[in-house]
Amino acid sequence: MSKIHVSTTVNGDPVEFLCEPQQTLLDVLRDELQLTGSKEGCASGDCGACSIELDGRLVCSCLVLGAEAEGRDVETVESIAVGDTLHPVQAKILEHGALQCGYCTPGFVVAAKALLDRNPDPTETEVRYWLAGNLCRCTGYDKIVGAVLDAASEMRGETS
Amino acid sequence: MRFEVADTLEGAASLLAGEQGVAHVLAGGTDLLVQLRAGMVKPDLVVDIKHIEATRTISESDGAYTIGAAVAGAEMGEHRTLASDWPGVTEGAELIGSTQVQGRASMGGNLCNASPAADSVPALIAAGATCTVVGPGGTRDVAVADIPTGPGSNSLGQGEFVATINLPKKAANSSDAYLRMIPRTEMDIAIVGAAANVTLGDDGTIMAAKIVLGAVAPTAIEVPEAGAALVGTKADDDALAAVAAACEAAAKPISDKRGSADYRKKVSGVLAKRAAKIAFDRASGNA
């Protein structure tokens, strides 16, 4: 079986890769492109640890075939910090201690940033529903939700 | 497994019909990739239909909507007039999965995957929606209700696929609603779904009504007795009690880990009357 040649854009850079037809975009990111920020949790779209943006739309990369990335724009967690400067969502997760094992954190960062890009002033309920597809088995979510609300407040220029 | 991208409806039909082995259509992939991973399906060919204009767009003509089979739920929710003209259809589609799943999951896939608990299907049936099926023999329009035939099976022939889902022009003074019951707050499969579509006469009484239940039979089922109980009323308590009784009688659910059959029957009545009331209030301009 011949591999599929894919030309795409990942985190703003043109990228080419070869993949198997059934290979997921998550596997391509991790195994072919060495972008290991996106994690595999459930591999069935339930846990959100593999969250990325595809053409600006939040999706689970475990539910996208690598071949589908042809001509698309892929943004992973690796694109979110600028150099050594963390995105407010990342900084607030650290400040609030909103992680323990950290495995789910990249997915939460990508999903929370996607929320704040669309809705700079979400309610707690909106944050909880938006993040319902991101599972964390350590924290109990309160600190994550608090960190996202605090990041939103900071990004709006309000003092926290 | 081969992966092909179709650029036209005819091209997709030709690829699917020409495959000697097992062929699957890829739209949002939120069911197909899970099934692939689990080994539940072993396709020889997967055809991505998302590069076909007709499957990716929502268009409106003289009040009737044509929704591409691969349009994601999130895209439906963001479409201003679709969501306001067909709030029940839209809220059904938007209940499928998480934010991430909403970015991909489509009504076409939800329909063809044929889960009895498919959240987008009851409101489509209540709306009288059809779908345009493309295949090697050409194009045919089929009632949405006639696509699922049982859990995981559908009526599509070899090489056929759903290209668009078509909503008729909304009747004056009409509206719809969809409610589902899940054992959790979010991210679960419906144990009961209930859709209502009502049309009011000039005096504000209901002159036509459809009630459709999901997850309580092998496919979504319309309950004509429940619709009939609403006609000539203003969705008063007696009419809603009759709706509930008709739905409890019509529901033929299974018992599973999410809920017992008795519980599902009871909830069928409760959700149907609540959905009917919401649809009535929306049609009356009070919601």
Image (cartoon, coloured by chain):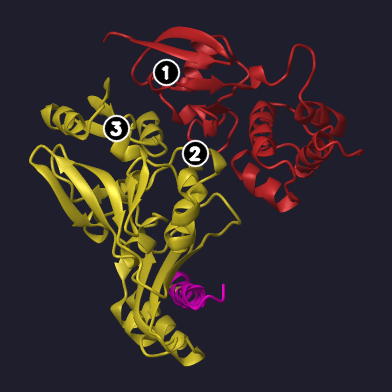
Q: CA distance from mark 2 to mark 3?
A: 18 Å
Q: Position of residue B66 (x, y in %)?
A: 31, 50
Q: Nearer the viewer, mark 1 or mark 2?
A: 1
Dominant SS of magenta comes to helix
Chain drawn in yellow = B
Boundaries of the magenta span: B263-287
As shown in the figure, which amino acid type bears the numbered disc 3? Ile
- Which quarter of the picture shows residue B125? bottom left
As shown in the figure, which amino acid type bears the numbered disc 2? Gly
Residue indicated by mark 3? B52
- Same-chain check, marks 1 and 2: no
Placement of A12 over or under A46, stated as above or below:
above
Give A136 or A33, whichever is nearer the viewer: A33
Quick one: SS at disc 1? Answer: loop
Residue that appears at 28% across and 46% down: B164
Placement of A105 over or under A81, stated as above or below:
below
Give B184 or B257, whichever is nearer the viewer: B184
Answer few, some or many: residues within 10 Å of disc 3's Cα (few below 14, many 20 plus, some between 14 and 19). many
Quarter of the image containing the N terminus of chain A? top left
As drawn, which residue projects farthest toward the right? Answer: A159
Quick one: SS at disc 2? Answer: loop
Residue indicated by mark 2? B103
Query: Mark 3, chain letter?
Result: B
Residue that appears at 14% across and 30% down: B14
Residue indicated by mark 1? A71
Q: Is residue B265 magenta?
A: yes
Q: CA distance from mark 1 to mark 2?
A: 18 Å
